Each structure stands twice: as structure tokens, then as C-alpha cells.
């Protein structure tokens, strides 16, 4: 199998490409630094943040709805 000789410009292009690729890979590795792990939102206790609304009996639930004009329930 015959490979033609590589001229100086081609060597320079390959060297430049290799340096740019190394910088790109290196910057990607740096940007993947570990961040502190936060607790999952599903595991957090939201009881203190929720408003306290009194319970409504099922038979009285329909009275608590606000219906816009033109709609009915």
C-alpha cells in the first residue's frame, strides 16, 4: 500500500488540529468538576412551606369551586 509523502503544511495542520482537540477535551474535563449533591426534591419535607387549608367534606366540595361566566358544573 502506497502512502504519499506528507508535506510541511499538512504536518502543521495535523499538529494544530491535535492541539485544538486536546484543549477541547481538557476544557470538557475541567467543566465536569463535581458539584455538591443536593437532596432530591421528592425527598424534601415541604410541610412547613404548604399553606394550611381546612379540610372540606366531600358533600360540600362543589360549593368551594369558582366557576367563570359561561361555564357550568
Image: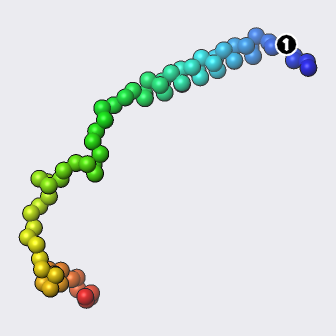
Q: Residue at x 9, y 63 (%)?
A: 52
In the displayed structure, 62 sits above or below 39; it is: below
Q: Is residue 32 above or below residue 45?
A: above
Q: Nearer the viewer, residue 27 or 63?
A: 63
- Does residue 66 show up? no
The image quadrant where one finds the N terminus is top right
What percent of the width, then of the height, locates residue 2?
A: 91, 18
Question: Left or right: 67 with respect to 22?
Answer: left
* Residue at numbered disc 1: 5
- Image location of residue 7, percent across then percent down: 80, 12
Which residue sits at x=50%, y=21%? Answer: 26
Most foreground residue, 1 or 4? 1
Q: Residue at point 69% right, 13% down?
A: 12
Number of residue marks:
1
Q: Would you say residue 16 is visible in this rendering?
A: yes
Q: Position of residue 22 (x, y in %)?
A: 57, 19
Report crowding for label 1: few under 14, some 14 to 19, many 20 or more residues within 10 A (C-alpha).
few
Quarter of the image with the C terminus in it: bottom left
Q: Is residue 24 above or below residue 66?
A: above
Residue 59, image x, y percentages: 14, 85
Amino acid at each position: 500500500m502506497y502512502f504519499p509523502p506528507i508535506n510541511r503544511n499538512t504536518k502543521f495542520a495535523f499538529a494544530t488540529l491535535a492541539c485544538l482537540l486536546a484543549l477541547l477535551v481538557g476544557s470538557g474535563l475541567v467543566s465536569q468538576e463535581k458539584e455538591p449533591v443536593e437532596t432530591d426534591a421528592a425527598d424534601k419535607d415541604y410541610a412547613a412551606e404548604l399553606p394550611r387549608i381546612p379540610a372540606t367534606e366531600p358533600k360540600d366540595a362543589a360549593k368551594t369551586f369558582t366557576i367563570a361566566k359561561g361555564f357550568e358544573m
